[in-house]
Amino acid sequence: MQDHNDHVEPAAWSEYWDDGARGAAQALGNAGLADQLNEFWADVFRPVFQNASTPIRLLDAACGTGIVASTASRTAQTASFKNLEIYLTDYAPGAVSAALQKPDLMMACGFVADAQKFPVDEGVFDLVVSQFGLEYAGMEGFGSAMDAVARGGSLHCVSHIKGGEIERECAQNLGVLETAQSSKLLKQFIALFLAIHAGRPERQVAGLARKATKASADVQKALHLAKPGGARDHVARLLNDMQRIMNNIRNFVPSDIEAWVAGQADSLEAYRIRMHSMVMAALDEEAIAQLADEFEQRDFVDIGVKPMVNQRGQSRIAWIVSARRK
């Protein structure tokens, strides 16, 4: 299993969540998948809350915007279960902040922490859950989550699967983003913009225009070959914005456009990091077998590991992992 990059990824993910977590839909692929996952979690929580006679402490580990915890809260309300304590943790501050703003999570307790070592006592949570999160921290992340489970409690997680539908989309997104970067699209654009704005000699401008045109053509080719996806839409919007600026070049101040280009470059890199992280985090059969062994060594029983398939039953989208601690 891969460990996350402590020095780079937190910033990339914080930008993602700070941007209103528009990425929740992006990360899940589509609304149908989001509905399927919500139904899965409701099915996990419903019998627990209906049969509970004592308070339940729940930890949503690597919580993102708290999608799973929010489903738990709503399911508890439907079951008239009033003794649910919800805790949220993620290593991106923007994620925790976004989660705690949800109406059904305003009473939850949220904290920023690395999934490789949660700052909680061992065995304090009756339910530990995670959706597309623990695998980013490698086996240490799963181990930390296991440690947090109380005796008699359970752990449930949905994790990226190698070769699955989500991983394939992330790999395609990664290819589009890397093409946009390797083409030097933004570098050629700003060089041409500044030359025209400064009234440079026609020959110099023509040379820069050829480079910018080639970079744009390389990116457009990649977009044409790519299936619909988040990165394709992102880069297509970038190309449209660049064309709009060039068509109205005298309406823009060079310093403003330089700042805009720098921001776009940072956004592309952050997006690339996220897609690369997703691809690297996806678990193959060997990693899942290793995880099942780890559960057994830590006194977990009722260990279940199986692929989740999409609603059409045509492709795998995730691993479903569950276990109960003795």
Image: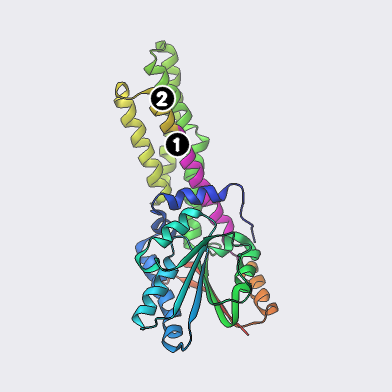
Outermost residue, right side: 297
SS for dot 2: helix
Q: Say which mark, if any, is on residue 255.
A: 2
Residue 304 at x, y = what percent? 56, 79
Residue 145 at x, y = what percent? 60, 70
User: Residue 280 in magenta?
Assistant: yes
- For marks 1 and 2, the one nearer the N-term is 2
Which residue range is magenta in the image? Answer: 262-285
* CA–CA distance in space, label 1 to label 2: 12 Å
Can you see residue 107? yes
Residue 138 at x, y = what percent? 63, 62
Residue type of the residue flagged with mark 1: Gly
Query: Where 226 sits versus 160, above or below?
Result: above
Numbered disc total: 2
Query: Where 268 sits versus 157, above or below?
Result: above
Residue 295 at x, y = what percent? 65, 76
Query: Where 139 sits versus 223, above or below?
Result: below
Left or right: residue 61 versus residue 258 is: right
Identify which residue, 57 or 257, lies in the foreground: 57
* Residue bearing mark 1: 263
Q: State whether the magenta stretch is mostly helix, strand or loop.
A: helix
Dot 1: few (<14), some (14–19), or many (≥20) neighbours within 10 Å?
A: few
Outermost residue, top side: 201
